[in-house]
Amino acid sequence: MKKIIDILIKARFTFFKPKNKKIVILDPAVSKPIEDLFFRLDYFYLYSRNEEINLFVLLKALINYKKNKNLSFNQVYILTYLNYLEPKIIINVTDHNIFFLNLKKYFPEAKLILIQQAWFAVDTFQKILKNKRKFSMSKFKVDYACLYGRNTSLFYSKFMKTKYLVTGSVKNNNFSIKKSNDKSIVFISQFRMHINYNFKKNTFNNISDENLFYRHLNKYCKKYNKRLFVLSCHTEQKLEEEYFNRNLGTDNFVFISKSNWKDTYINSEDFNYFVTSSSTLGYELMAKGKRVAFVFLKKFFNWKFENIKSSFFAIKDEGFFWTKSEVYEKFEKILNNAFFCSVLRHRLNIKKYINPYMVYDKGNKKFINFITRLNNREL
């Protein structure tokens, strides 16, 4: 009951019979970054997390729910809404949502498009493989999947039958490359509350390899006279900033906060040298030509599909610009390789090791051309 009351208090309400829309974009909580790609097209955002509730659809869904007890009420609400909208194209960026992946079952005539927005954690991937059996399907049917890079298809193909289009990160593609600062190093935060903070004890967890990593980072910056910045990954940053104050020292770095997803990309454009563990942003920036060193922390090792070789570090533990070693000398070596190698060597590294997993398409030309042709029924 409390949950229902919270939803009713926070939600916006509308009461109109939905009109037909050619394009429906699901789940604006995570799909807002792609909105600019559709501004010339007839599209509609379908809220799926109770942020906005259509009372007309809600009443119809209550009736339909009695006939669909195998689905949650939220799922019946979404299906009811889509039946009124009658879309020709359905856009989904929540690629781990089993229900969204199965929408072709309910709307076989609509074109179902998946846009990759992140990389899977291993447990998410395993959950998809396990739960798809509930739908009595060997693979989910999706018309098109827009991926970061060609190798991403290796794990999508395990649970999805589709046509692949390599577009890169549609968020990253919105931002151009500009001349940037070589006098600083930016560490891309991957602070995770469920890993780095102990709620029962109300304190930060002590993770040995992270502690050692931060000591290495401070040592390197002092040796090479580089100013250290930390690029936040959360909009609520109080605990995140406190965590880095404790591990790096308040006088040893500058914390870069953000208020929305765009700030991450805008702030990163001011710099050229980056260090990360396995952040998607690291791949995005290197695909654009930035200098990025990857030092992999153990807490992230099980999040990747090493058996499917979904990244260069799944092929071998150490390469020209990445390492799993905790030894400072190797840390220093791969940072120097990443930051100071020749332009030619850097371009070759991007082509060989980054582009199979992430490409950069300035202005999203490939995706805009694709969705325009699909909208015009040329595909």
Image: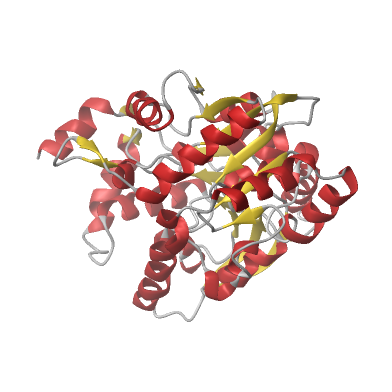
Q: Position of residue 372 (x, y in %)?
A: 76, 46
Q: Residue furthest left?
A: 1
| Residue at screen point 66% across, 25% down | 225
**Residue 85 appears in the figure:** yes
Looking at the image, which is closer to me, 376 or 147? 147
| Residue at screen point 53% across, 48% down | 277
Q: Residue furthest top?
A: 251
Q: Residue furthest right?
A: 344
Looking at the image, which is closer to me, 62 or 255? 255
Q: Position of residue 21 (x, y in %)?
A: 57, 42
Tell me: 87 left or right of 192: right
Q: Position of residue 168 (x, y in %)?
A: 70, 50
**Measured along the vertical axis of the image, is residue 58 above or below residue 13?**
below
State the quadrant of the N terminus. top left
When asked about the image quadrant of residue 97, the answer is: bottom left
**Measured along the vertical axis of the image, is residue 101 above or below residue 90?**
below
Q: Position of residue 340 (x, y in %)?
A: 78, 40
**Measured along the vertical axis of the image, is residue 216 above or below residue 6?**
below
Tell me: 178 left or right of 326: right
| Residue at screen point 74% across, 38% down | 290
| Residue at screen point 60% across, 40% down | 275
State the quadrant of the C terminus. bottom right
When asked about the image quadrant of residue 135, the answer is: bottom left
What's the image's color scheme?
A: secondary structure
Looking at the image, which is closer to me, 321 or 48? 321
Tell me: 115 left or right of 350: left
**Residue 278 appears in the figure:** no
